[in-house]
């Protein structure tokens, strides 16, 4: 550790890394799309729609929360204005449960009363009263976890009807599993067939520039320990392999590297702190040949059985 750095500097650096929100190209595309929906004024035409597909850990929920925070509730004397309504969809969700969840988020004291039809009517009334301009459903893939084609069609039909009757645009965000909702409902599919992809970044030629932008942004936050130069292709590739290209893992690796470097002081080596960070927060007890930050790494993707990025069942 540098001689003039104290514990407070380490703590501040870690807070900055954890709270950092970068305007990376993928993020900008999503924000521009969402802003277009907020600014849209539906008169006679059908409300617009938007789909956002992102793997777990790519930062999708963070982007949505940051965007929604720019449109806070406004307490008027006679009503509460809710310009953007962000709704995290719970696991194993039904239409009735979802409707009740939305009403609770909006602050309705009657969120748990009535059947699906009653709750939907209450919701349509509140959306109008609260002057809502955009509804964002996050983790909408949870609506696809239950039942088969018939239930998926009914969920899709409810979403379509909610948007049509309220005249409020809807954004659907989730993993690839969410696609079944608009694949089984043609009318919903007409609005959401084009999805913005928030995908992991690899060290391919196509992704390398954006990946380095991300790594540079995080590196610039660190002044208290020595770290590898992630402008170098080899170091950037190591981070891509170690993190699976997921923003959540990149953030976690930087945080743990700072923690390890602060413990070891001047004895730490830049590359070794990330190798140890990988062992501690991504792949416990990984052998050197499966650790991208070691010289013995064999260069193969960490997608084998028992490895962190092995394909998961959908």
Image (cartoon, rainbow, N blue to C red):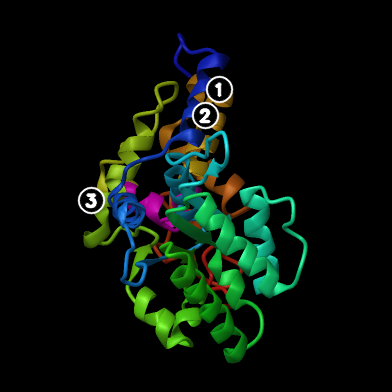
Q: CA distance from mark 3 to mark 2?
A: 25 Å
Using the rendered view, name the quadrant where residue 102 is placed: bottom right
Q: Nearer the viewer, residue 225 or 95?
A: 95
Mark 2 crowdedness (10 Å alpha carbons): few <14, some 14-19, many ≥20: many
Mark 3 crowdedness (10 Å alpha carbons): few <14, some 14-19, many ≥20: some
Q: CA distance from mark 1 to mark 3?
A: 30 Å
Q: Can you give x and y, in whole percent of width and height, for residue 174 in the image?
A: 50, 66
Q: Nearer the viewer, residue 269 or 253?
A: 253
State the SS at label 1.
helix
Mark 1 crowdedness (10 Å alpha carbons): few <14, some 14-19, many ≥20: few
Q: CA distance from mark 1 to mark 2?
A: 5 Å
State the SS at label 3.
helix
Q: Can you give x and y, in whole percent of width and height, for residue 217 in the image?
A: 33, 36
Give the left or right position of residue 22, taking residue 164 as reference.
left
Circles 3 and 2: CB atoms closer than 8 Å: no
Q: Can you give x and y, in whole percent of width and height, for residue 203 in the image?
A: 30, 58
Mark toward the start of the polypeptide (3 vs 2)? 2
Which residue does the numbered mark 3 point to in the structure image?
Answer: 209
Q: Which residues are magenta?
A: 236-248
Q: Can you give x and y, in whole percent of width and height, for residue 242 in the image?
A: 46, 53
Is residue 144 one of those drawn in magenta?
A: no
Give the left or right position of residue 137, taking residue 71 as reference.
right
Residue 11, numbered label: 1
Is residue 242 one of those drawn in magenta?
A: yes
Please name the residue shown 46% across and 77% down the image: 179
Q: Is residue 89 visible?
A: no
Circles 1 and 2: CB atoms closer than 8 Å: yes
Residue lying at the far right of the rendered structure: 113
Which residue does the numbered mark 2 point to in the structure image?
Answer: 14
Give the left or right position of residue 16, taking residue 313 as reference.
left
């Amino acid at each position: 550790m540098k001689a003039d750095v104290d514990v407070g500097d380490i703590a501040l650096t870690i807070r900055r890394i954890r709270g950092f929100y970068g305007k990376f190209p993928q993020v900008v595309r999503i924000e521009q799309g969402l802003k277009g929906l907020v600014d849209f004024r539906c008169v006679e035409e059908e409300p617009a729609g938007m789909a956002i597909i992102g793997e777990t850990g790519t930062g999708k929920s963070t982007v949505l929360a940051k965007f929604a925070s720019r449109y806070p509730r406004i307490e008027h004397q006679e009503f509460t204005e809710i310009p953007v309504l962000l709704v995290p969809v719970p696991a194993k969700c039904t239409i009735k449960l979802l409707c009740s969840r939305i009403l609770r988020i909006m602050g309705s004291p009657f969120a748990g009363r009535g059947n699906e039809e009653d709750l939907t009517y209450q919701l349509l009334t509140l959306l109008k009263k609260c002057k809502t301009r955009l509804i964002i459903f996050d983790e909408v893939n949870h609506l696809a976890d239950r039942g088969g084609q018939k239930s998926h069609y009914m969920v899709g039909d409810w979403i379509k009807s909610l948007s049509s009757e309220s005249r409020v645009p809807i954004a659907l965000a989730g993993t690839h599993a969410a696609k079944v909702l608009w694949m089984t409902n043609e009318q919903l599919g007409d609005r959401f067939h084009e999805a913005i992809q928030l995908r992991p970044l690899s060290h391919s030629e196509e992704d390398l520039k954006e990946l380095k932008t991300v790594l540079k942004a995080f590196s610039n936050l660190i002044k208290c320990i020595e770290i590898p130069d992630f402008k170098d292709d080899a170091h950037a590739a190591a981070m891509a392999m170690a993190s699976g290209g997921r923003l959540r893992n990149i953030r976690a690796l930087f945080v743990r590297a700072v923690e390890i470097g602060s413990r070891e002081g001047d004895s730490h080596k830049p590359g070794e702190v990330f190798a140890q960070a990988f062992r501690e927060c991504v792949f416990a007890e990984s052998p050197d040949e499966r650790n991208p930050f070691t010289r013995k790494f064999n260069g193969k993707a960490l997608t084998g059985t028992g490895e962190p990025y092995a394909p998961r069942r959908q």
